[in-house]
Image (cartoon, rainbow, N blue to C red):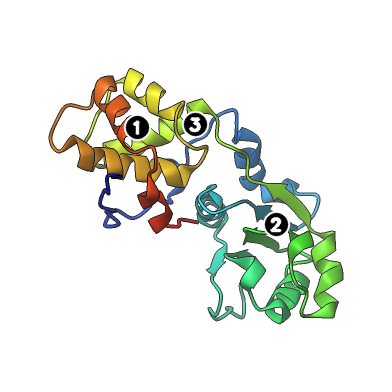
Amino acid sequence: MAHQYPLDLSLPAPYAAANFVVSDANRALFDLLRPPAEWLNPHLVLTGPAGAGKTHAGHVFAETHGAHWLSPGAPVPDTATRFVVDEADTFDQEVLFHLYNRTASDGRLLLLSRQHPAQWTIRVPDFESRLKAMRVVDMPEPDDSLLKSVLKKLFEARVITPSDDVLEYLSRRMERSVAHAQKIVTGLEAYANGRAFTRSLARQFIETSENMTWFDDWDEI
């Protein structure tokens, strides 16, 4: 019988720019988001599956450059010229069309999407040519160094300090996903139940949780 571990959602994801972990895997993306004045195109689409880190990357851009965050159904401020649009593949395309035009001269528009724009269902014909003109960047897959740093930050948020060999062990055996790092930390904390966070404990947790069906119970963007 597979063990089930509680999902503690009480700790919000730390989306501050200072908490964005940078490694060789995502350094190019981080450098791209910081100086939008150097973009060749004022419009950028950032794509990747759930848990890839799009939301955090978008918040880094919004915080650094004062961009307005838009979720589906949210009102669009009249005077803003920099925007981050979350879940852009489900967003009102008429609104996206007008945002594209508004930001074309001196603004910036960052769209976050699980789907590549080529997979979108176009409902507003005038928007199609605008979408095709946007630069598309895929979220990079995290490397071991990035996953270790993310795990360390997540453990620190829970006042837990596992040794480097524990972080090394976990980073080499988990899925390449920031969301799964969050779930590993939640599950391992529950599994430890007050015991020391040793490599032996981490190995027992991974071996016991091979099915890890509880991972599918929480979908983080």
Label 2 residue SS: strand
The percent position of residue 89, horizontal first and vertical second, equals 66, 67
Q: Nearer the viewer, residue 76 or 182?
A: 182
Foreground mark, 3 or 1? Answer: 1
| Label 3 to label 1: alpha-carbon separation | 20 Å
Above or below residue 4? Residue 76 is: below
Mark 3 falls on what kind of element? helix
Residue furthest front as drawn: 1
Q: Which mark is residue 147?
A: none
Check disc 2 and report the residue beneath it: 45
Regarding residue 157, the answer to whether it shows in the image is yes
Of residues 152 and 64, the one nearer the viewer is: 152
Expressed as whole percent of the image width and height from the top left, the position of residue 144 reads 50, 27
Does residue 117 appear to the left or right of 156 in the view shown?
right
Image location (x, y in percent) of residue 9: 30, 57
Residue type pointed to by label 3: Leu
CA separation in Å, label 2 and label 3: 23 Å
Q: Earlier in the sequence, mark 1 or mark 2?
A: 2
- Residue type, label 2: Val
Q: What element does badge 1 sit on?
A: helix
Query: In the rendered image of this protein, does residue 48 appear above or below residue 147?
Result: below
Q: Identify the amino acid type marked 1.
A: Ile
Q: Position of residue 185 (x, y in %)?
A: 32, 40
- Residue underneath mark 1: 206
Say if mark 2 contacts mark 3, CB within 8 Å. Answer: no
Measure how far apart labels 1 and 2 are at the Cα level: 36 Å
Tell me the quarter of the picture where residue 171 sits: top left
Q: Tell me, yes or no, whether the two marked residues, 1 and 2, touch with CB atoms within 8 Å.
A: no
Residue of label 3: 146
Asked whether residue 14 is in view, the answer is no
Earlier sequence position, callout 2 versus callout 3: 2
